[in-house]
Image (cartoon, rainbow, N blue to C red):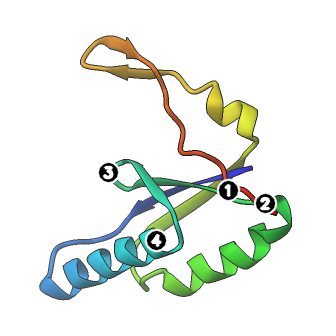
Amino acid sequence: MRLLLFFDLPTHTPAHRKAYAAFKKELKKLRFHRLQYSVYVRHCMDAHRGDLLKKVLRLVPKQGDIKIIPLADGTYERMTHVQEGRLRPHHPPAPLLVW
């Protein structure tokens, strides 16, 4: 399972920009990978999804808009990637290995 996270945070003031940068830094610590500006994705086991969502919700700044969509691995891997008018191969981050 993948979690697709979209966010739109204000950057009008220095305090807003600081909160934006801190939010992105914490997403990276939680092993989210950037797909595009303000769009991040992370592989997770279905059983751990609730814990991960709780961690993300604690990070959310008071202002802004955040959406999280769970996607099945197969759906995510069928993503179409078009860059500069050309179809590009989509290379998803490797899933976590659990032993």
Q: Element under label 3?
A: loop
**Which one is in front in this view, the residue at disc 1 or the one at disc 4?**
1
Say the numbered circle drawn on residue 45.
2
Q: Position of residue 49 (x, y in %)?
A: 76, 67
Tag 3: amino acid: Tyr
**Which one is in front in this view, the residue at disc 3 or the one at disc 4?**
4
Q: Element under label 2?
A: loop
Crowd rating for badge 4 (residues with CA inside 10 Å; few <14, some 14–19, many 20+): many
Q: Earlier in the sequence, mark 3 or mark 2?
A: 3
Crowd rating for badge 3 (residues with CA inside 10 Å; few <14, some 14–19, many 20+): few
Q: Position of residue 62 (x, y in %)?
A: 43, 86
Q: CA distance from mark 3 to mark 4?
A: 13 Å
Tag 2: amino acid: Met
| In the image: residue 92, left or right of residue 17 | right
Q: CA distance from mark 3 to mark 1?
A: 23 Å
Q: Earlier in the sequence, mark 2 or mark 4?
A: 4
Q: CA distance from mark 1 to mark 2?
A: 8 Å
Contact check, label 1 and label 2, Cβ < 8 Å:
yes
Badge 4 is on which residue? 27
Crowd rating for badge 2 (residues with CA inside 10 Å; few <14, some 14–19, many 20+): some
Badge 1 is on which residue? 96
Q: CA distance from mark 3 to mark 2?
A: 25 Å
Say the numbered circle drawn on residue 37.
3
Of residues 45 and 94, the one nearer the viewer is 94
| In the image: residue 17, left or right of residue 42 | left
Crowd rating for badge 1 (residues with CA inside 10 Å; few <14, some 14–19, many 20+): few
Tag 1: amino acid: Leu
Q: Up-down: is 98 above or below 53? A: above
Q: Earlier in the sequence, mark 3 or mark 4?
A: 4
Q: Element under label 1?
A: loop
Q: Element under label 4?
A: helix
Q: Up-down: is 35 above or below 5? A: above
